[in-house]
Image (tube, rainbow, N blue to C red):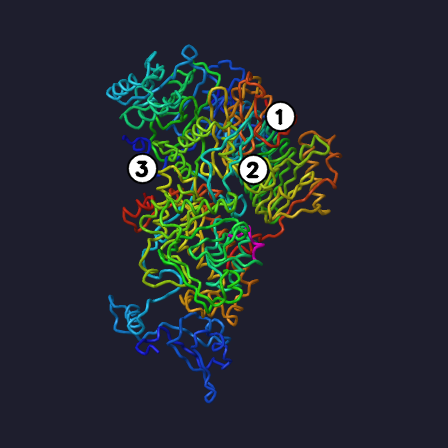
Amino acid sequence: MLTSLLPEFTVDRDEGRCIQCRVCERQCSFDVFGYDADHNVMVHREENCVACQRCAVLCPTNALVIKNNEYTYKPNANWTREYIQDLKKQAETGGVLLTGMGCDKPHKIYWDHILINASQVTNPSIDPLREPMELRTYLGRKPDHLEFRDGELELPDYPNVVLSTPIMFGAMSYGAISYNSFQSLARAAFDYGTLFNTGEGGWPKELRKYGKATIVQCASGRFGLDLEYFNDAAMVEIKIGQGAKPGIGGHLPGEKVSEHISLTRMIPEGSDAISPAPHHDIYSIEDLHMLIHALKEAVDYKKPVSVKISAVHNAPAIASGMVRAGADIIVLDGLRGGTGAAPKILRDNVGIPIELALAAVDTRLRNEGIRNWASLVVSGGIRNSADIFKAIALGADAVYIGTPALMALGCTVCQKCYTGKCAWGITTQDPYLTKRVNPEIGTQNLKNLLRAWSLEIKELLGCGGINSIESVRGNRLQLRGIGLEDWELDTLGIRGAGQ
Amino acid sequence: MSASTAQVSKTRTRYSATQWVKLDAQGVYYKDLNREIRSLALKGARRFEIRNVFGQRYLGTNLWGIEDRDKIQIRVYGTPGSDMGAFMDGPMIEVFGNAQDATGNTMNCGKVVIHGSAGDVLGYGMRGGEIYVRGNVGYRVGIHMKEYMDKIPTVVIGGNMQDFFGEYMAGGRIIVLNKFFEDNPPVRQSYFIGTGMHGGAIFIRGDVDLNQIGAEVGVEDPTDSEWKAIEKYVHNFCRVFDLEAKKAKLLKRHKFTKLFAKSSRPYGRLYAY
Amino acid sequence: MKDLSKVNNPYNDEKVISQCSIFGMMNTAGDPVSGKDIITAISNMHDRGNGLGGGFAIYGCYPERSDDYCLQIMFDTKVSQEDTEVYLKRFFHINLSEEIPTFPMKAIKNPPDVWRYFVQPKVEEMHEIISEDDAVTRRVFRINTRIDGAYVFSSGKNMGVFKGVGFPEEIAEYFGLEDYLGYIWTAHGRFPTNTQGWWGGAHPFSLLDWTVVHNGEISSYGANRRFLEMYDYVCTMHTDTEVVAYAVDLLARRHGLAIETVMDIFSPPVWEQIDRMDQKERRYFEAIRSTYGPLLLNGPFAIIVAHHGEMVAHTDRIRLRPMVAGIQGDMVYASSEESAIRLVSPELERVWIPVGGHPVIARLKDVPDHDVVEGGRELEKGEKVEVYPTC
């Protein structure tokens, strides 16, 4: 064991409240609790605790409090406890540090430096509860203009998908998350009229009935791909990168490749599922063009094809190339985007905040006169409905949410997804744990989240005197910056508050 | 100020309550016109006949503090301006022509009779009194009408209405005769009727399609006591517009649809804990 | 590049806000009428403006020079006029130039010099294949963005815009508009809230022979503007109305869409209503909303758009600004208030409040199949509009 580390957390048990029911012991998947029968007390191995709070929430007598360990190294602004512990772990193992979820570093969160406008006097605010308030969103290429022949509209032949609200569930593969979690996302998206993304881990056959709510992914691992997979879905997404780990691939360890996952991914049971860093048929932009059109061919040009990249320094130029290569939808995943497993050093240091990338890409595409050739979807760091509203006003068509969706299923962002021991039953394949997500309740909670955020977006629209989301899209006059420097306001394309 | 109005007020110091005082509003600014009416009313005049009205606003608003103001009658010939009868508390205004927007805005008491049609937002926040419109009405009519204790505002419309009718309605009653001159008129395709309704009732002569009404609105037949009220106000409608012959035809109970608020708290599930 | 926004938008607000009264009238037989009625009508709505802008558009006012583009230009200085004339001479044949007659009065302060030039674009100066309209548009933008102190506020054939800082009745008197004749007239009384008023910022706004007068505020301005900028429009004025004028130009002239479709793009039905339509209509609205969604004009507005042969009165889809339409004989009227129409035409065969988002379109009678489009789904074919007696 790593004896030189301090426990990160402590377990405070109120012995007066504890009834030795041993719920904590059964619920903890990180082996923190034991029962000392001789003394009829519970014992703790605090060094194992990850602060997932499963025990504290389920304790019937509220006897448990999980706390940050107050006993720490001598405080040091440079050598923080995190860096000391990380270093020691590496000295003891010689390994790369893994982590889960998105970057947790205090990089500036631009959403918190942007404020939203409201109508007063010169135009009326609109009451969203009683007047129509529209969130319907179409994703896909739009024609430059409409043609009429003899008064008859020539229908544009660019395929689009329709969302009832501009919120989709981002790519999380079956394998990275449990079947019950995966299924809850599919059902909630289907019921609510939006889309979920299968990620690259295939798409179980029995869930194909939710096809109109499904985006299937074509990533470098090419798991579970066939023509049926593409054609059963509403949209196909090429994943180039993700915000949490730009430029690297993935690895689902063989022990997680169960019979059902093996069937879904179309690989042998027990074998490692490895996603290479790049697509080995895409080494350049013209290769992307080739893959996009191969997929379009595969779906007979009836479904839009999106391309997802992580938000990196030259995202605007890349995005412009992607649009010209035929992408119908561009997905940008920002610095704070989540993951099931990523090297910590990449997660925390590579990429740029989604707010800046989004603004820069939208501006570039408009300057080039091709903004309507593709829709723009952003992800990575959306925390509430105001973030979504701000994203749309900066220029996004819709957002993906990943971490928020998992939180609706129970996740408390303990960042241990990569261990496969998720005590909330989400990022694990252990049947003892996965049943903790009840798909009925999971579906309902996800739908509640979509509903609640949609209602709040309508309130924000209404207070700005706008009754349809397309009038906010790219409408940066609805935003003002606060606590931002000129270059930041410039990049975001917004004025400062009071200007 | 036109010569004729100025003359009237200068030449007399006292007016009888039964005499019709005639005013010509041609080219008169609304402020002067309304001030003139008030000063005449202070001198005892209770009946006014105003000709050539073109857009003068706020008729009937400035009569607070005048004794027996519920005896004041103003006959308007022409097209009165917006906010006619705004905050009005007692008088009666009769318009021989069409009214513009916001008639009876937040009216507390009194009566408005319009022989033509009326514009948008008629009866906004109206708390009491009666409005009769022979023709059609515009958008958002009856918006946030409310009732309190014995004050129940009533609007009767002979024609039909545009969208957002009875929006946020919190009380009172609106009766829509839906083209009183026809036997079986279809209800006009107006939408968002009663959105946000949480009190009061709308009675429409004719069938209403469910896609025309807000989610908060229920549909049923009028009750016995409601029918009595409908009878009373349709009777009044026919009297003020001289349509006694139509009354029997209009008062066919089975043709009326009642729209009501399903709940006085339609947004209970809107908020998280 | 000069910055007109500094003139029209001295406080550098995100945009210039103004509310207003609007009035339009058209003789559908094409017979010219004088400006007397529209001046009477718009001045009756005096209280809807605040004296910081008034203006008129007249169609058919230069019949003797109906083939020439008439550029009406305001100049702050003699130098700006000289610069402009050098530029005009390079790109146009100038068939006539004259100062527009004015009648100075107390209420009108610091008026610019206002001239009109009847011109034809020089073919030899067009270095690419573009239409004459495009060539004129390009030169107008160039003068307005490059030549200090010069502003072209009217550029169509056989029509003219007259506008300035003052109440509309004062502007009418200043230009002597009672003596002009035209078969379409539109007028505007302005109530800006964040500008002292600048002559060029008054309505109507125009480009070629399209003009727009507008009442309300368009909350989607930022989205509309960024979309138009993608099509090379330079929004120099920071006003909603400018955006409406350019959107009409893009959709009706450059994309060749019917005016009905343009209005559908500005204020389409809500999705809930579209979902209930038959397949053909549903597809139409789906296509226009997804293609031209950024040009949905969101927020309260009432506009009167005109060009030769057509006058269109239109409101936002939930009708947050007023509009009344009336017909008497060959005359079609549209106004913020009915009383203004009644003042000039006490008797009306028909008078109605158009349904929100449904345009009232008046057309010349000699155009086959067209006269007045009712602008209201409630008016089924053959249904009579109730007209009530007035005085």
In the picture shown, does residue B250 fall above or below A411?
above
Mark 3: few, some, or many residues within 10 Å (few <14, many ≥20)?
some
The answer to whether residue C328 is visible is yes
Q: Residues at badges 1 and 3 in contact (C-beta under 8 Å)?
A: no
Let me know if marks 2 and 3 both belong to one chain: yes
Question: Which mark is on residue C283?
Answer: 2
In the rendered image, which quarter is residue B151 located in? top right
Horizontal side of B62 relative to C117 (left or right) equals right
Q: Nearer the viewer, residue C321 or B175?
A: C321
Magenta segment range?
A207-214
**Residue at point 40%, 79% (across, down):** A45
Residue type marked 2: Arg
The residue lying furthest to the top in this view is: C64
Question: Which mark is on residue C388?
Answer: 1
C-alpha distance separating marks 2 and 3 = 42 Å
> Does label 1 or label 3 sit earlier along the sequence?
3
In the picture shown, does residue C149 fall above or below B125?
above
> Does label 2 or label 3 sit earlier along the sequence?
3
**How far across and how far down the image is residue A292, in percent?**
44, 46
Q: For the residue labelled by badge 2, is the local secondary structure a helix, a strand or a loop?
A: helix
